[in-house]
Image (cartoon, grey):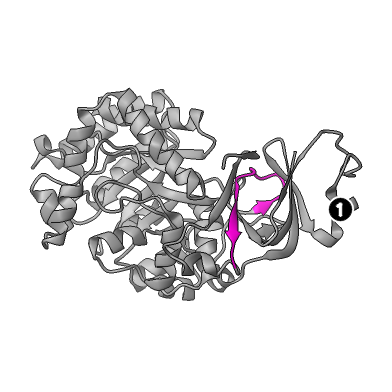
Amino acid sequence: MLLIKNIKKLVQVEDSPRTRVSGTDMSFLPSIDNAWLLIRDGLIKDFGRMEDLPAGGTGVDFPFGESDSFEHIDAAGRLVFPSFCDSHTHLVYAGSREIEYIDKIRGLSYEEIAKRGGGILNSARLLQQTSEDDLYYQSLGRVKEIISLGTGAVEIKSGYGLTPGDELKMLRVIRRLKENTGVIIRSSFLGAHSLPAEYKGRRGEYVDLVINEMIPRVAEEGLADYIDVFCDRGFFTVEDTERILEAGSIYGLRGKIHANELDYSGGIQAGVRYNALSVDHLEFTGKDEIEALLDSDTMPTLLPGAAFFLGMEYPPARKMIEAGLPVAMASDYNPGSSPSGNMKFIMSLGCIKLRMIPEEVINAVTINGACAMGVETIAGSIARGKRANVFITKDIPGYEFMPYAYGSDLIDSVILNGEVLM
């Protein structure tokens, strides 16, 4: 057992866990001052105010009915948060793309770089030349990095393979990461991430390959939790997306859609029609898209790191929240458009660029992030019975300081499955 006591503020506590937080409710953040948190067998067992901790939580007479020995952490002056839930990443990739970064500085757009054979196709070439073991160890380093930055649950996509064998290779790497790290991992099959160069002018044939060969093989090996499509201008159409979502649903793969990053693509409405778990990016979101989302169980997920890195328009978070929608935020960690998995910085972008208040961004990267990757019953808040994935901050004034101090390392300790890692 592990007892964390004298916590300055225990953030995002729930006696009755919620599945999501929407609209004006996103401005509320339930917390306990001067708190304690008890962890046992990798789960959150109990919590409360220090004044209500029986016998002060010391010695063998700690009266919770357990005779086990337990460890103490004195968190005086520090806050405890549930770990971040990063519901959209591409962190399994080979190499890097800093040369394209220079092209961006010189004025080339994301689409112009892609048309020259860069972008996703560049990452696909590198990945196809990389062994599964090398890909695993490169990716393992990134997972360890995000754990140190406070992430305790992450969704990872394929999509840099673009051939049946290489897509499967990516998904097997994701499975190995899930088996060998303490972080909660969900995987998404994203065979329709981009059109391979050899299929130029034959998009329908490539969609057929995704549907008829890739999806059955992914399902046969049980390699994916979800299926994703890049439904946007210059990539895959609404018709392509719906065909792929229908094929995935036969195998129990629910959708998570890249939508409306580059234009009003119809991807949001397609995601809603097919009950997608989330639709992500959403830079181009208007009245029709918001109305479609209001009548759905689909989580709008914003990726401000990509808009920041690419110098693009930011999604209209305020309009979405004021309309009553829930909003999640994720890092989009990938080599081309968001090469960072730092969710604390994503919170800062939410405040600075999306005009969200601190309570809203914390809800967006915890409870709503968990919902956007289907792990809301085990992650996203401090609730009894949930996975004990939490982090302890350094001595800071309050939770508002987390997004405010956008460049500072404020995490003192990381706990995954009840185990103190740092």
- 220 magenta-colored: no
Spot occupied by residue 63 in the image (x, y as percentages of width and height): 90, 44
Kind of residue indicated by mark 1:
Gly
Q: Is residue 226 among what the camera can see?
A: no
Spot occupied by residue 374 in the image (x, y as percentages of width and height): 52, 46
Q: Nearer the viewer, residue 223 or 51?
A: 51
- 392 magenta-colored: yes
Q: Is residue 306 among what the camera can see?
A: yes
Q: Which residues are magenta?
A: 382-396
Left or right relative to 307: residue 113: left
Placement of 410 over or under 223, stated as above or below: below
Left or right relative to 160: residue 293: right
Q: Secondary structure at mark 1?
A: helix
Image quadrant in which you'd find residue 174:
top left
Name the residue: 47% across, 71% down: 321
Q: Quadrant of the C terminus?
A: top right
For disc 1, the marked residue is 56
Image quadrant in which you'd find residue 192:
top left
Left or right relative to 176: residue 98: left
Spot occupied by residue 26 in the image (x, y as percentages of width and height): 55, 69
Left or right relative to 138: residue 382: right
Spot occupied by residue 95 in the image (x, y as percentages of width and height): 24, 37
Crowd tier of the residue under label 1, counting other residues whose Cα lies within 10 Å: few below 14, some 14–19, many 20 or above = few
Q: Nearer the viewer, residue 56 or 155?
A: 56
Q: Nearer the viewer, residue 253 or 40?
A: 40
Q: Quadrant of the N terminus?
A: top right
Image quadrant in which you'd find residue 36:
bottom right
Name the residue: 44% across, 27% down: 176
